[in-house]
Structure formats: C-alpha cells, structure tokens
C-alpha cells in the first residue's frame, strides 16, 4: 500500500470533527435541519464511472493519458422537492456530484466528452445538455449513522 493512501485515524477524526463542529453546525442551526455529513458509493458504481471516463476520453482523444484524467467532487445540495429517483427525505441535504476532469496546459479542467471537441472542457452552459457525471450515493442522515466510524 502506498504511503499516499495512509492517513492517521486521529487526523481523519480531527478533519471530520472540524467539519461537524463548524460547517455542519452552522448549516443545521441556520437551515433548521439535520444535514447529511457523509455520502457512500459502492465500488462497482465508482469503477464503472471511472471506466466510462476513460472510454469516453479515449473516444474523442485517442492519445489521452490516464495521468491527465481525474474526478472533481463538487459539494452540492438536493432541491427542496427532489424528483424521483431521489428520495423525498434527501430534500435540501448535502451531496456530492462527481465530474470528470482532463488536464490541458497543466490545469485540470472539468471535462464533458459529450460536447463538441472544442467545447469538451466547458461543461457548463445556458442550454440544458447531458454531461458525464455521477451523483446519488447514500446519505447519512437520513441513513443510519451506526455504520460510520468517524
């Protein structure tokens, strides 16, 4: 196992506590809700998303290197009235949206392989369109926190 994949449990706990004691407390008090503090995704979903990023990137750029691809995690929140398949008890809670990135000129740009070549590094726009993205893991809360260690 690489040392870059190791973090002390005390640092993890400190980071989680910092979030819960500051941002989460502020959100819960000011929005009068019990916001999510973790999001879980199963490995097959994550592996499938990574494989799709690699496949789609190679489709539009056969010379792309894996080192030039990545994933940006955006903090996000569900709307007041979620639309199926999002459960109604996820309303207004934190979530994550994962967006592929592609390195160009030393910068990691958001990347949408479903855009035309010159616009593939510009995911956002005024016209609704599809983007390669991943969302909707299991939130805690409303899920049971008994499964969490931190």
Image (tube, rainbow, N blue to C red):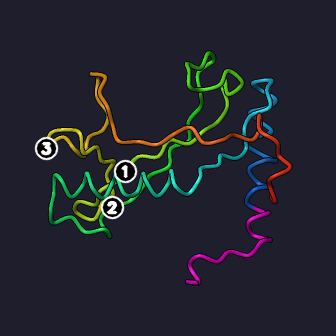
Q: Quadrant of the C terminus?
A: bottom right
Of the image marks 3 and 1, the number of the one nearer the N terminus? 1
Q: Are the residues at dot 1 and dot 2 in contact (C-beta closer than 8 Å)?
A: yes
Residue that badge 1 annotates: 100
Q: How many marks?
A: 3
> Earlier along the polypeptide chain: callout 1 or callout 2?
2
Rendering coords of residue 17 (x, y %): 80, 55
Which range is magenta?
A: 1-14
Q: Position of residue 50 (x, y in %)?
A: 40, 57
Q: Which mark is residue 118?
A: 3
**Residue that mark 2 sits on:** 69
Do the residues under discs 3 and 1 have CB atoms within 8 angstroms? no
Q: Position of residue 137 (x, y in %)?
A: 60, 42
Q: Residues within 10 Å of mark 3 (few under 14, many from 20)?
A: few
Disc 3/disc 1 C-alpha distance (Å): 16 Å
Q: Looking at the rendering, in which quadrant would you find the N terminus?
A: bottom right
Horizontal arrangement in the rendering, residue 104 relative to residue 70 (left or right): left
Q: Secondary structure at mark 3?
A: helix
Instruction: Characterize the magenta stretch by its predominant secondary structure.
Output: helix
Secondary element at tag 1: strand
Q: Residue 56: within the magenta?
A: no
What whole-number distance in Å separates the C-alpha atoms at marks 3 and 2? Answer: 17 Å
In the image, residue 64 above or below residue 134: below
Q: Residue at x 80, y 39 (%)?
A: 25
Residue 103 figure quarter:
bottom left
Question: Between residues 45 and 91, which one lies in front from this camera angle?
Answer: 45
Magenta span has 8?
yes
């Amino acid at each position: 196992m690489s040392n870059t994949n190791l973090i002390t449990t005390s640092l993890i706990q400190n980071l989680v506590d910092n979030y819960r004691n500051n941002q989460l407390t502020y959100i819960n008090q000011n929005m009068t809700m019990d916001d999510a503090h973790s999001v879980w995704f199963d490995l097959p979903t994550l592996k499938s998303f990574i494989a799709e990023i690699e496949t789609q990137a190679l489709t539009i750029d056969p010379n792309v290197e894996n080192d030039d691809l990545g994933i940006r995690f955006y903090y996000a929140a569900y709307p007041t009235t979620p639309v199926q398949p999002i459960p109604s008890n996820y309303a207004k809670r934190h979530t994550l949206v994962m967006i592929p990135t592609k390195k160009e000129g030393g910068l990691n740009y958001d990347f949408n392989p479903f855009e035309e070549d010159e616009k593939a590094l510009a995911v956002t726009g005024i016209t609704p369109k599809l983007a390669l993205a991943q969302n909707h893991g299991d939130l805690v809360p409303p899920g049971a926190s008994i499964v969490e260690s931190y």
